[in-house]
Image (cartoon, helix red, strand yellow):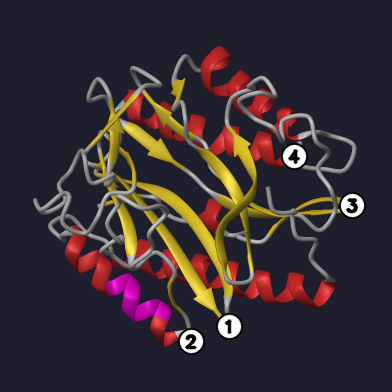
Amino acid sequence: MPPVPNLSPAHADAAYAAAQCVVETHRRLAGWLRVGVTCAEVDVFVAEQLYGMGGKSCFLAYRPRRGIPPFPSHACHSVNDCIVHGTATTWTEPLAKGDVYTVDIGVFLRDWVGDAAWTYVFGTPAEEVRRLCNAGKESLARGVRELRPGNTWTEWARAVQRHVEDECGFHLVRGLGGHGIGKGRLHGPPFVSNIPLPPVAWPEAHKPCEPGTLVAVEPMIAVGTGETRETRKGWPIRTADGSLAVHYEHDVLVTEDGPRVLTEGLEDLPDVIG
């Protein structure tokens, strides 16, 4: 396994700029979204914003392994039962009231990666949807607080699972989790599971959160199950029972003083549309 990079202060500033490029794109998107737009139109909008700020999508043409085709969109578009990795054409209907829509945006900005997902709801959320979204945002906030020297990565997972499953009664999606990011690197160590796992399944579980480590952490939560189904192509991944899912993601740098959220500002977005 390759080593976990350790960021210098100068590198941290560059990573922050990339993360804030993603935040600004989400901010503009939240003000632009409306009932009736399509995921394809959103994809064009995201690409234009990233390009206008000097960046480019780090998802477009991304290929995690052999056998999976290059990702065909600038952002990931996940509607309703789609958890992650929806493409601009996975959902072709215009977005309508009642839809739950996660947009995951990733950028290369001067070769540094910013990567953050946020969920938007069209129309007044039903009570269950409101609770689901709140569980996602609150579990992310609680987990981030645990990313500090002296803790292990398992402390993140315990905090997230305690809130989502024990307190809220929803399900964390199995088999998916956060990851290290950095310069020219969209996915790398450490893997950050959203549920506690034994070391045989999660080698980094009991390793310490070292200052200088940059991770994208991302609870993925479903109403009815933590199990998934996916197409032969690998894009997208859906809930096995067709229930609604949400996905929230921050970029976090572990520092000597605790976690520094590089994607700060996402939590202030207007995420109810129309």
Q: Residues within 10 Å of mark 3 (few under 14, many from 20)?
A: few
Indicate the secondary structure of the residue bearing disc 2.
loop
Label 1: state its secondary structure.
loop
Circle 2 residues within 10 Å: few <14, some 14–19, many ≥20: few
Which of the two labelled residues, at mark 3 and mark 1, occupies the earlier sequence position?
A: 1
Main secondary structure found in the magenta portion: helix
The amino acid beneath tag 3 is Asp
Horizontal and vertical percent position of residue 201: 61, 25
Alpha carbon of mark 1 to alpha carbon of mark 4: how far? 29 Å
Q: CA distance from mark 2 to mark 3?
A: 31 Å
Compare residues 266 and 201 and report the one nearer the observer: 201
Q: Position of residue 16 (x, y in %)?
A: 67, 70
* Badge 4: residue crowd in 10 Å (few <14, some 14–19, many ≥20): some
Judge whether residue 197 is colored magenta.
no
Check residue 257 in the rendering and tell me which mark sits there, or answer none.
Answer: 3
Q: Secondary structure at mark 3?
A: loop
Is the residue under label 1 in contact with that under label 2 (CB below 8 Å)?
A: yes
Could you tell me how far apart the alpha carbons at marks 4 and 3 are, in whole angstroms? 11 Å
The residue that label 2 is drawn on is 54
Task: Report the residue at 26% width, 24% height from top.
Answer: 243
Q: Looking at the image, which residue is at 74% across and 29% down?
A: 155
Which numbered mark, 2 or 1, is in the foreground of this view? Answer: 1
The residue carrying mark 1 is: 110
Magenta range: 45-50
| Amino acid residing under circle 4 | Arg
Say which label, 2 or 1, has the lower sequence index.
2
Q: Earlier in the sequence, mark 2 or mark 4?
A: 2
Q: Secondary structure at mark 4?
A: helix
